[in-house]
Amino acid sequence: MLVPTPAIALSRSHDQRLRQMYRSAGWPCQDTVEIELLAAGLLERVRPAAGPEHLRVSDLGIQRLADALNRNRAVLDAHEALVGRVADHVVEQQGRIAWRGLTLLAKPGEQWLHLRPDVFSIRNTTVEDYVEPIVHEIKVKRADLRADLKKPDKRAGYIALSSQFYYVLAEGVAEADEIPPECGVMLATADGVQTLRVAPKRAMKLSFGTFMALAKADPVRPLREPAPRF
């Protein structure tokens, strides 16, 4: 008598392998991830009359890929929506000049890093010593935050680019004491964005490379045009 196989707990690595199989010729890897995908019915073996056996994603596997795509799209949409809220908050409430999606160079250690802060802003001033650049990194998913906290070089790069560095968390993502002390913490709720812990501040000036990147990019436009001055 066959004993029922217990349900397999599928993880991100299973979804990644499934996408790889969908894009490839389906040559077997013969590892545990593949065994579990076959057992779950997400992969199936193909035995052609001529040629070696290979694998293909089943109809059930295609449905799982589509579901994962929709979940990822929803997270991305939530992330971009919060990035927009934070950028608007920085511009409207703090009177700063802000940019989204910049690619900036930083050298916190021996190597240069290409970084893309979610929101980068400076004070609206013509005095070089007063620009006080701030980086806001947005997190709407706990797994994304945990992965980010395992990258001290990236975090050091953001700190090197700014006089203050903040993590902005969606509700339920983490508590403030889970964030390293060198970072500030902000919480985004339905009522607005509030500061849970002020980031340590250090004096710094914009590098020439950062200044050129800002000069070439379009800043975030304010939601409301400023009142005319006579």
Image: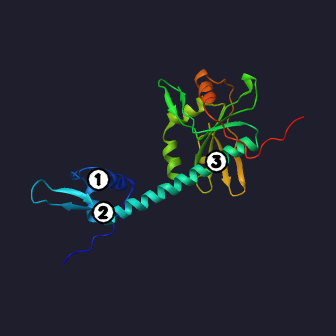
Q: Secondary structure at mark 3?
A: helix
Q: Which residue is mark 3?
A: 84
Please state which amino acid type lies under the numbered disc 3: Gly
The span from disc 2 to disc 1 (Cα, nearest Å) is 11 Å
Amino acid type, mark 1: Met
Which of these two is toward me, 229 or 203? 229
User: Which numbered circle lies on residue 42?
Assistant: 2
3D distance between C-alphas at marks 1 and 3 = 36 Å
Q: Up-down: is 2 above or below 127?
A: below
Residue at point 63%, 28% (across, down): 215
Label 1: few (<14), some (14–19) or many (≥20) C-alpha neighbours in 10 Å:
some
Across and down, in percent, residue 152 comes to: 51, 36
Which badge, 3 or 2, is on the more N-terminal residue?
2
Classify 112 as above or below 143. above
Left or right of residue 176, residue 92 in this image: right
Which residue corresponds to mark 1?
21
What is the CA distance from the residue labelled 3 to the residue labelled 2? 37 Å
Say which element carries label 2. loop
Q: Amino acid at mark 2?
A: Leu
Is residue 104 or residue 220 the one in the foreground?
220
Can I make out residue 30 in this image?
A: yes
